[in-house]
Image (cartoon, helix red, strand yellow):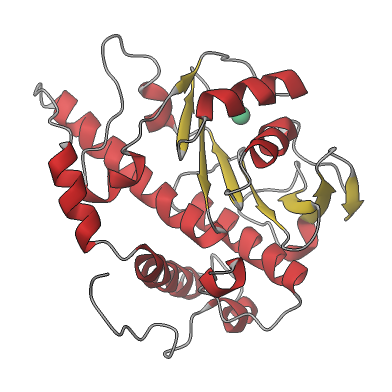
Amino acid sequence: MSVTELRPSRGSNAPVEQIKLETAATTRLLEAEGILDYSGHVSTRIPGRDAFVIQIGSTSRAEVSPESMLVVDYDGKVLEGDGQPPSELPIHLEILRARPDVQSVLHSHMELAIAFTMMEGVTLVPMRARASRWKSGIPIDPDPSHIKLPEQGRALAKTLGPHHAVLMRAHGLCLVAESVQGLFVDAVHFKENATAQMQALQAGAKPIPLTDAEIAQIERMEMRDWHIKKLWNYYIRKANTENVLPQSWADQLVPTKEMLKRDKTMN
Ligand SMILES: [Zn+2]
């Protein structure tokens, strides 16, 4: 299945314009959900080009638009757009280089996730059903500083390895996914899962992570592509109603009724 077929947006834009729009919309949605704030960023590959989009570093995450997205190559050179990328660009460069299966990368300073890098004897684990996504593990990168050098980015990509998430000691996290919509949905579920584990800890209880058998059963019932479309539809429409996204973006982002039609409920 091609990347284009996975896209739940209806977008009739040229591919690069659609990627800019979807990445800008995702950034605003993540800010509205408290996953991004004054910092953090999202990058998405441009299919068929040796380049990706990322926002201008100084643009408010609540106001990012397709016009504030840059096209950057894998050497970090800005090919299109008027501005400078975020100072932590090496995070995106090195993860996208190391992981050809990944289309989109999120770097966030989510407080709740950072807490799991600062508690002795506590590891963030899959608790909620949707957290089966992180069954292979959530490693912690030991570098607590901002990632501004290529060698730091390479070390982070090495810690991430084949996983879908990496925590960064006292700093933040990165998530990776096969599409920018999938990345957004993962971020929502990552926060839900960290919240669930923190609530268990705060209740003074020992968290009970999902077992391998439970994860296998969850995956038998899972329809990731459809689930991504469903949540994307919900959050884009909600953001339009609440003026998080301009109304004029809706036509290119809201899935059509046809796209949301399901011919089965499990794989
Ligand atoms: Zn950072």
Report x, y in % for residue 135. 31, 38
User: In which image quadrant can residue 252 be found?
Assistant: bottom right
- The quarter of the picture where residue 234 lies is bottom left
Q: Residue at 42% across / 89% down in the picture?
A: 257
- Give the total of numbered labels: 0
Indicate which quadrant contains ligand 1.
top right
Q: Residue at x 16, y 52 (%)?
A: 217
In-image side of 130 versus 52 (left or right):
left
Query: In the rendered image of this protein, does residue 177 appear above or below residue 237?
Result: above
Relative to 99, does residue 154 appear above or below in the rendering? Answer: above
The answer to whether residue 83 is left or right of residue 212 is right
Residue pictured at 34% horizontal, 49% vertical: 189
Location of residue 215 in the rendering, given as x and y in whole percent from the top left corner: 20, 45
Q: Please provide percent x and percent y for residue 210.
A: 17, 38
Residue 190 position in % (x across, y down) = 36, 43
The answer to whether one can see residue 149 in this image is: no
| Relative vertical location of residue 156 with respect to residue 258 in this rendering, above or below | above
Specify the farthest residue to the top: 120
Q: Decide if residue 182 is in sight here.
A: yes
The relative height of residue 21 versus residue 157 in the rendered view (above or below) is below
Query: Which of 119 and 34 lies nearest the eye of the viewer?
Result: 119
- Toward the viewer: 43 or 86? 43
Q: Nearer the viewer, residue 75 or 11?
A: 75
Quadrant in the picture for the C terminus: bottom left
Looking at the image, the residue that sits furthest to the bottom is 258
Tell me the residue at 43%/90% (across/down): 258
